[in-house]
Each structure stands twice: as C-alpha cells, then as structure tokens.
Image (tube, coloured by chain):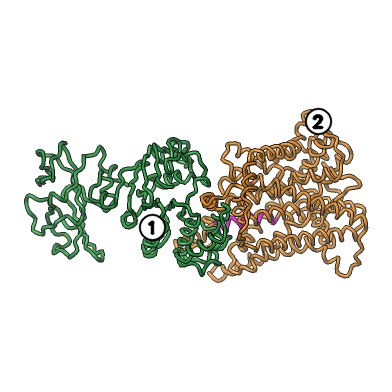
C-alpha cells in the first residue's frame, strides 16, 4: 500500500464506524419518534397516571440523592479514614448488580421482612439504591479535580467548613452534581426490571407500562409512552448542557453564625450518613443473599441453563462487536480536529445512554421488526445499542488523557501510523477498554426493560427472574439472583483492578 | 500580634510514596526560632528541606507532631487556621477561579463578617496599591502570572492580619517579573507594617528581600541572621555554599595557624585547634596567577564563562577539585593554561572537617 491509499483506508474506517453508529445504534434508538409524525396522538388516563408516577419518583429520588449523594461524596473525598477503601468498594455494587436481582432483594427486605406494601414508597426505596452510585461517582470525580489549595486558601482567609463548601467547593463541582442529577433522574425514569417487582397494580411506572402495553399489543399507546420518555430524556440532557455553562459565582453574603453552627455538625452528619448507607442502600441490596441461605434451593433445569447461555452469548457478542466499532469511534471523538462534530457525536452517545431502555427497546423492535429479522438478532442489536455508549465513553476519556505528544514522538522515531496505534496508544488505553467492556457486559447481562420490549419467546436470565417472581417461584428466582450476584462480585473486583491501572 | 515563637517543633509524616511506603519521614526536626515584629523573614533552603512544612505549621494548615507555636506569647498550637488570623500567599496563588478579582480579594473580610464601607474603601486602596483597581471585575483566568501574584498578595493583606505567610510567592513567575515583584512585596510589607515569613529556595531572592534569613536543611535550622551576617560569617559549610556559593579547600594543619593544601602552605587568619581544616573562599576573593608560583595552589583553566557583569573562571586543581573564580575585568589567562591561585588570610572562612564532606555540602 502506498501512503495515499493508507490514508484512504483510515478514512474508510471512520466512515464505516460513523455509518454503523448512525444506522445501527442511533437512528433505531429514536426511530419511534417517527411514529409521532402523522400519527394521531391520544394519551390514555392510564398512561398519564404512569407518567406522573415515573416523574414524581424520579424527582423525589433525585432530591434524596442530591442530599445524601453529595454528602457521601464529600465525606468520601475528604476522608482520610482507613474505612474509605470499603466504602469505595461497596458504593459501586448497586451499579453492577443486575437490577432484577436488586429488585427482588429490595422487595424481600422491605416487603417480606418489614411488611411494607408494594407501590410508590417501595419504588422510591429501590430507585434510591441503584441511582446513588451515579450521583456519588459523578460528584466525587469532579470534587477530586478541585485543587486542594483552594480549600487551604479559603481556610487561611477564615472560612469555616460549611462556608467553604458553599462558596468554594460547590460552585467548582457543580457540574458533577448536575451530571449526577441527570443520570439519577434518567436512570430512575428508565428502570424497568427491578421496578416491576416492587410496583403494585395501581402504581406502575411508564417504562413498565410500555412493556405491558407492548405485550398486550397496544402499539400506539406504547409508542406514545416511548416517545414521551425519549423526548424527556433528551430535554433533560440539553437542559443539563445549558446549566453547566455558568462558571462564575460571586459571593457577597455569608451567614457566619449559622454556617459555623452547621460546620460543627460534622459528627452528626457522619452518623446519619452511615445509617442511610447501611439501612437504605447496603442491607436491602444484600438481603437476597441472607434470604438464600435460609431458603437455599439450587435448581438447574433446561430453561435456566438456556437463559444463561442466551444471556452470556448476547453479552459477549455485543461487547466484542461493540469494541470493534467503539475504539475507532472513541479515537474519532477524542482526536478529531473538528470539535463541533466530535461534540455532536458525544452528545448523541449521551442521548442513547440516557434514553429509557424499555422505550429504546420498543423503538428498536419497531425498527428492526420492519425488516423481519430473527428475534435473537433483534435482541442482540438492541443490546448493542444501549451498551455501545458505555464502551465509547471510557475509551474516549482515556484517549483524551493520553498526551498526543507520545504519538507524535513515536511518529518522529519512525513508527508507522498503525504501529503507533498498536504499540503506544493501545497499551495506554487498555485498562479503559477492559473497564468499558466489563460495564457493557454486565449491563447486557442485567438489562430487563429493553429485553422485555423486544423479545417474545427468548428469555435472558433477568427476564427469567422477572417471570419466576411473577409465578411466585421465589426460591428459584432467589437462587438465580444469587448466581448473578456472584458474577457481579467477580466482575466488580476485576473492574477495581483495572481501574487501579488507569 | 506577631512576635512569633516556635518551641521544639517536630513534624513527621508517614510516606505514601510507592517506593518508601509506610516509612516515617521527619519533615521538620525540633525547630525552635523567634521572629521579630515588622520584620521580613525568609525561610531559605533546598527543596525538601522542610521550609514549606514549617510555614504550614505556623499557619495551622498542618499540626505539629511535637512542640508549640506561640503568637505574642500566646500558645496557638491547638488553634485552627481560621482562629489564628493570618494572611497566606500560595505558590500557585490559588485564586478562586469562579470568582472575579474583587470577590477574591473581599473573600476574607466577607467570610469573617467584617465587610463594611470602611473595608470596601480599604480594599480599593489595596487594589490601587497593586495597580489592579481597574481589573477588579476580571476573572483570574484573564490575568497574567504577575497580576495573579499581586491579587494573591492583595487578598492576604485584605484580611488585615498583621502576619503574612508567603510560600514561594515568586517561584512560578519568569525571572524578570519575579525580580521586579520582589521590591513590590517588600514595599507592601513595610507600608502595611506586616510581619512576613517568605519561603524560597532562591538565595538571591532571599538576600535582596530579607531583614532576616533562616537557613534550613533536612528539617533543621542551620543558621539565621541578616543576609550580611550569614554571608560574611557562615556557621557551616552548607551556609557558605548555599548562600552566595563558596570554594572549599580541605587541608591538613601544619601548626596552629598554617595549613597544607597539596603542598601549598596557607596561612590562616587565626589559630585553629584541629588536625584537619576546611577553608572556604568566595569566588571573588580568589586571585589567578598566569605564571604559576611554586608555593601556591596549582591548577588549570578549564572554562571561561562571560556572565555579563563579570567573568567566571572554572579552574581544575590537580586533585580534581573544581574552583570558581569571579573577575570584574577579564583575566589574561586562556583556556587550558596552567595557573596558580592564591587568596588573603582575611578572606578565608574556617570550618571543621565534617564526617562526610559531600553530604555536608550537598543540597
């Protein structure tokens, strides 16, 4: 190959990647929006009801997480305690535990142990658990970027702990709080599998309704519900981009007495946070394991085995196919000279990530259903859609963090472009590739909403758990959850190890 | 407030560095010192000598492992930074990026609930003083390094604290601007009648700016005094070498006031009781004889450097010792030429031969 054709080859990879993203990931995900064009829109009372439940749950959960998530992140970042490492390990757990398993665990804890009724409150208790890590992680990440000397400078100028938090830290990590709030809100809006287990007949959320409507064949209402969910996710995304623009805050007023008294509440705060984390987050998440010890019934029938094969097969293939396209896509976003185009693609990935999965699944089913694809293929394509951004994001960040001068010096030393990628860039971003792959794999393994919206006959493990719970086969469901838990643990440890190298 | 006194201050850290993880590191080692009111003091020493830690101990940003800190005979060891009422200028200025200059500078009075019409006027006058009154609405990212530095100083002065602590305040600036700002700093400290403690590793900066220099090495105070006192009477090989550079000759004593350096007989300014002695001679006190004299120290010109206002001659002695001689007018000797050197007894500093000469000299 001469130089010119090599350049063309490079461009070809970009073009194929972009086409893949647009036509396999992005357009199918929002295809349902076309339904609104020319279609008659009629919203049923049932849908309004479900939407109002969804939005109020998301709103309350966001408020709860703003209070506890920000406080936890603050304690987490500032703490020099040796217990910090434990918190660090535990905080991600709800993120990686399959939501169906989490839903069952929460139901067993609050429903069976505490005799709480299914419905609004239990949905909130569930949603707080799996959204909290998003809030803590985003806030902690942006807190960690704040230069320590800002705090020291404010201290030497006389600011007490709370004043310092309000006037220095909060304005500086505000963007992390907004990101955390957006993720919390949209995750809560989108969750299906776990919510099904704690929702009552009267109180149902919109994504659960989408699945129900789809199963009962009410396509128009399911489509409208999906459209509303997708549009609200997009609106939230743009609102957040707008809010993160404000960078300047000047403070003239301080309430020295009040703020000093709040600054002195640190030990009370730590006590409340510990209680919250233990009883609202940790124990409900783990309860299923205790439950299993009491009611242990290891069953491996053909159906269960098949669901495992399906789940792992899909998870593995979407991760591999996703990686093939995610790496060039990430390189394109991170290194493109056209910043506007790169940020457009980044926003499109965020949009796919935020769109509620059952709406996304419904949209994908409509899109691919038109082409009369095989059900398993449609299922795999839908999983590809919501896992792809999970791969692209960390790899993009990793490539951005690699100083371009490494690649330039390798080029000057005589390495070919290809050699530069394989010998310099690739080894440096490998931890991010592994981390992204684990996240994508686990997400595919645990996803319920989109899977339910797409599949008829094929059952993944998470869908099977939902079915078993519906049929009151709790012991079997509990056992499956236990197995998923173990897998989640193993992956969590693997994830921690690779993150250390990043 | 400030007559500052440190009594037996020690600060140890547990290393978090991968290579030395878990080891105890003594950053400040039993330091006692007194600082006079309204004086400009510098903590001078090589990097890692504990000078910044000492400053942070005075500010309360670090707590001592042992020892006490007194402000005007009052024990402040257990007081928080806020309660100590200090002004602190950080190395990277640490201007709050989300606040404009005005709000950065008023932050201290505002959070202490001392902001009123009078302080407003006062802060305007400070900003005028540092020539930034017109940029009050600008954000830190819009300022040059020198301007940021002046804002950082103004912010510390605005607290009305009589004590100003400065951690390498000129270190991040380019040499020309940093040199000019030295005088601004001095002027401000004198005008507002502050007591300043200024950390630096730059000996030239310390000499020009200070009333009092505190020399530190490996966590200990080696010597303190006015720049002239330390320059003329360094108490150690390290002091002589670090403040103003010095050449050393390691000799055997012949009798009470003569020493032998590689066959050259050197008369000392006074009697010296030990068997071995280290002579220190500043570069500008060394004479070069282009026709080598037999009884003098023999060497060869290795390099000649033109430094602008003076010439530097690097001389290699027969035992390998390197000597630097400074001349205001060029000497006739050429590179490679064999020469001899000499100096007057009055210009010799006398030191005991240390156990490990290189370690003693090293920074």
| Residues beneath discs 2 and 1 located on the same chain | no
The residue beneath circle 1 is B190
Q: Position of residue A244 (x, y in %)?
A: 66, 61
Disc 1 on helix, strand or loop? helix
Q: Quadrant of residue A221?
A: bottom right
Residue A389 is inside the magenta segment: yes
User: Viewed as shown, does residue B302 lie left or right of A168?
Assistant: left
Q: Which chain is green?
A: B
> x, y (%) of residue A121?
83, 44
Horizontally, residue B17 falls left or right of residue B302, namely: right
Residue at the bottom extreme? A4
Q: Count the labels in the image.
A: 2
Q: Give me the C-alpha separation between circle 2 and circle 1.
A: 83 Å
Percent position of residue B308, x then y:
25, 66
- For label 2, the residue is A297
Secondary structure, mark 2, is: loop
């Amino acid at each position: 190959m001469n130089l010119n054709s090599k350049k063309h080859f490079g461009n070809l990879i970009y073009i194929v990647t972009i086409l893949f993203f647009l036509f396999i990931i992005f357009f199918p995900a929002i295809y349902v929006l076309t339904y609104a064009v020319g279609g008659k829109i009629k919203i049923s009372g049932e849908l309004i009801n479900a939407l109002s439940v969804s939005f109020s749950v998301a709103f309350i959960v966001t408020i709860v997480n703003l209070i506890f998530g920000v406080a936890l992140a603050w304690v987490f970042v500032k703490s020099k305690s040796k217990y910090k490492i434990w918190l660090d390990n535990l905080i991600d757990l709800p993120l990686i535990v399959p939501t169906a398993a989490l839903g069952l665990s929460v139901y067993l804890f609050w429903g069976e142990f505490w005799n709480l009724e299914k419905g609004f409150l239990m949905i909130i208790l569930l949603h707080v658990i799996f959204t909290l890590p998003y809030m803590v992680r985003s806030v902690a990440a942006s807190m960690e970027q704040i230069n320590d000397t800002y705090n020291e400078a404010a201290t030497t100028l006389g600011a007490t702990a709370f004043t310092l938090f309000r006037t220095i830290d909060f304005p500086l990590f505000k963007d992390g709080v907004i990101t955390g709030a957006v993720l919390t809100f949209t995750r809560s809006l989108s969750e299906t599998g776990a919510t099904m287990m704690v929702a009552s007949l009267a109180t149902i959320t919109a994504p659960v309704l989408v699945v129900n409507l789809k199963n009962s064949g009410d396509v128009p209402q399911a489509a409208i519900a999906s459209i509303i969910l997708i549009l609200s996710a997009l609106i939230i995304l743009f609102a957040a981009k707008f809010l993160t623009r404000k960078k300047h805050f000047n403070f003239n007023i301080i309430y020295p007495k009040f703020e000093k008294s709040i600054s002195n509440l640190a030990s009370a705060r730590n006590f409340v946070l510990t209680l919250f984390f233990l009883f609202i987050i940790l124990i409900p998440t783990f309860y299923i394991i205790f439950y299993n010890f009491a009611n242990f019934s290891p069953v491996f029938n053909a159906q269960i085995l098949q669901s495992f094969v399906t789940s792992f097969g899909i998870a593995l293939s979407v991760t591999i196919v996703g990686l093939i396209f995610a790496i060039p896509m990430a390189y394109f976003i991170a290194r493109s000279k056209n910043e506007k185009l790169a940020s457009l693609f980044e926003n499109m990935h965020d949009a796919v990530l935020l769109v509620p999965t059952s709406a996304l699944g419904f949209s994908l089913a409509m899109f691919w259903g038109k082409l009369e694809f095989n059900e398993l293929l449609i299922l795999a394509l839908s999983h590809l859609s919501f896992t792809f951004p999970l791969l692209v994001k960390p790899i993009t960040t990793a490539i951005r963090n690699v100083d371009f001068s490494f690649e330039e010096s390798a080029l000057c030393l005589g390495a070919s472009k290809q050699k530069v990628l394989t010998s310099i860039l690739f080894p440096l971003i490998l931890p991010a590739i592994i981390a992204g792959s684990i996240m994508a794999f686990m997400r595919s393994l645990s996803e319920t909403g989109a899977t339910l919206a797409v599949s008829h006959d094929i059952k993944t493990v998470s869908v099977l758990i939902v079915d078993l719970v519906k049929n009151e086969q709790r012991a079997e469901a509990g056992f499956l959850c236990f197995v998923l838990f173990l897998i989640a643990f193993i992956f969590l440890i693997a994830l921690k190890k690779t993150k250390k190298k990043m | 407030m400030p007559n500052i006194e440190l009594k037996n201050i020690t600060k140890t850290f547990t290393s978090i560095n991968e290579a030395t993880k878990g080891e105890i590191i003594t950053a400040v080692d039993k330091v006692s010192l007194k600082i006079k009111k309204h004086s400009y003091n510098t903590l001078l020493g090589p990097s890692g000598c504990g000078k910044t830690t000492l400053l942070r101990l005075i500010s309360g940003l670090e707590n001592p492992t042992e020892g006490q800190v007194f402000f005007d005979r009052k024990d402040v060891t257990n007081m928080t930074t806020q309660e100590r009422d200090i002004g602190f200028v950080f190395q990277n200025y640490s201007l709050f990026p989300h606040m404009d200059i005005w709000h950065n500078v008023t932050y201290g009075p505002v959070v202490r609930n001392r902001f009123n019409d009078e302080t407003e006027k006062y802060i305007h006058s400070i900003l005028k003083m540092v020539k930034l009154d017109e940029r009050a609405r600008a954000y830190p990212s819009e300022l040059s390094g020198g301007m940021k530095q002046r804002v950082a100083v103004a912010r510390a002065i605005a607290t009305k604290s009589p004590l100003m602590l400065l951690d390498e305040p000129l270190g991040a600036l380019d040499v020309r601007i940093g040199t000019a700002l030295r005088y601004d700093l001095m002027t401000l400290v004198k005008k507002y009648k502050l007591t300043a403690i200024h950390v630096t590793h730059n000996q030239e900066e310390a000499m020009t700016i200070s009333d009092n220099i505190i020399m530190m090495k490996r966590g200990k105070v080696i010597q303190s005094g006015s720049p002239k006192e330390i320059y003329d009477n360094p108490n150690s090989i390290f002091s002589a070498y670090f403040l103003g550079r010095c050449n050393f000759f390691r000799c055997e004593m012949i009798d009470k006031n003569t020493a032998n350096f590689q066959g050259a007989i050197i008369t000392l300014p006074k009697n010296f009781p030990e068997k071995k002695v280290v002579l220190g001679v500043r570069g500008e006190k060394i004479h070069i004889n282009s026709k080598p004299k037999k009884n003098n120290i023999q060497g060869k010109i290795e390099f000649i450097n033109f430094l602008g206002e003076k010439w530097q001659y690097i001389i290699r002695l027969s035992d390998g010792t390197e000597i630097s001689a400074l001349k205001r007018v060029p000497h006739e000797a050429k590179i490679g030429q064999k020469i001899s050197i000499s100096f007057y007894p009055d210009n010799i500093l006398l030191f005991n031969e240390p156990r490990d000469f290189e370690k003693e000299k090293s920074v």
